[in-house]
């Protein structure tokens, strides 16, 4: 994972484990809306966003016709798609403190 993708990944993990504000939730919904609905739902389930239950990689692949490894590749690709957008770049520059958390 490159630096841009890693920063978004860290942000999403922190949202799941540390909770989020209404503003962060809204911003995250906006970012995920840049994806196709099935890809958006895969990220929501994988990162346990918006109080959704966590699904295993196998559960996320149901109905997609891909293996767990392929699904992980798709998740990584979608993180990269979002990470290069101006929307994430603006949000990433506003949210510097999360980068200093030790995970």
Image (spheres, helix red, strand yellow):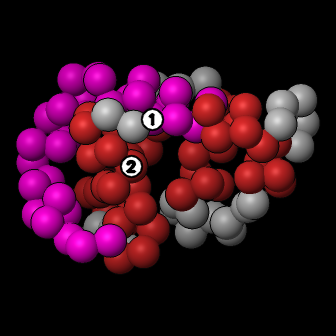
**Other residues around mark 1 within 10 Å, as few (<14) / some (14–19) / many (≥20):** many
Can you tell which mark lies on residue 9?
A: 2
Q: Is residue 61 left or right of residue 78?
A: right
Q: Mark 1 — residue?
A: 79
> In the image, what residue occupies the spot 25% across and 29% down?
87
Pick the front one: 11 or 67: 67
Residue 75 image point, x, y percent: 58, 37
In the rendered image, the vertical position of residue 71 relative to residue 11, given as above or below: above
Task: Please name the residue shown 39% across and 49% down the image.
Answer: 9
Q: Residue at x 17, y 43 (%)?
A: 92
Q: Quadrant of the C terminus?
A: bottom left
Front position in the image: 51 or 103: 103
Note whether residue 30 is visible.
Answer: no
Rounded to the nearest angstrom, the CA distance separating label 2 from label 1 is 7 Å
Q: Position of residue 25 (x, y in %)?
A: 37, 56
Q: Is residue 77 magenta?
A: yes
Instruction: Tell me, yes or no, if residue 12 can be seen here.
Output: yes
Q: Secondary structure at mark 2?
A: helix
On screen, residue 77 above or below 26: above
Residue 97 colored in magenta in the image: yes
Q: Residue at x 27, y 46 (%)?
A: 7
Question: Is 78 situated above or below 27?
Answer: above
Is the stretch drawn in magenta largely helix, strand or loop?
Answer: helix
Which of the two discs, 2 and 1, labels the residue nearer the N terminus?
A: 2
Task: Kindly indicate whether the residue at mark 1 contacts the one at mark 2 (C-beta within 8 angstroms).
Answer: yes
Badge 1 marks a residue whose secondary structure is helix
Split into 4 quadrants, where in the image is the N terminus?
top left
Quarter residue 8 falls in? top left
User: In the displayed structure, does residue 22 sit left or right of residue 16?
Assistant: left
Q: Which residues are magenta?
A: 74-103
């Amino acid at each position: 994972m490159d630096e841009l993708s890693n920063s978004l990944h860290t942000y999403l993990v922190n949202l799941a484990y540390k909770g989020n504000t209404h503003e962060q939730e809204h911003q995250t919904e906006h970012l995920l809306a840049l994806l196709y609905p099935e890809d958006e739902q895969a990220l929501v389930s994988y990162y346990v966003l918006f109080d959704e239950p966590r699904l295993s990689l196998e559960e996320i692949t149901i109905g997609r016709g891909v293996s767990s490894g392929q699904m992980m590749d798709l998740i990584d690709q979608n993180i990269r798609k979002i990470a290069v957008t101006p929307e994430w770049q603006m949000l990433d520059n506003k949210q510097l403190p999360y980068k200093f958390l030790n995970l």
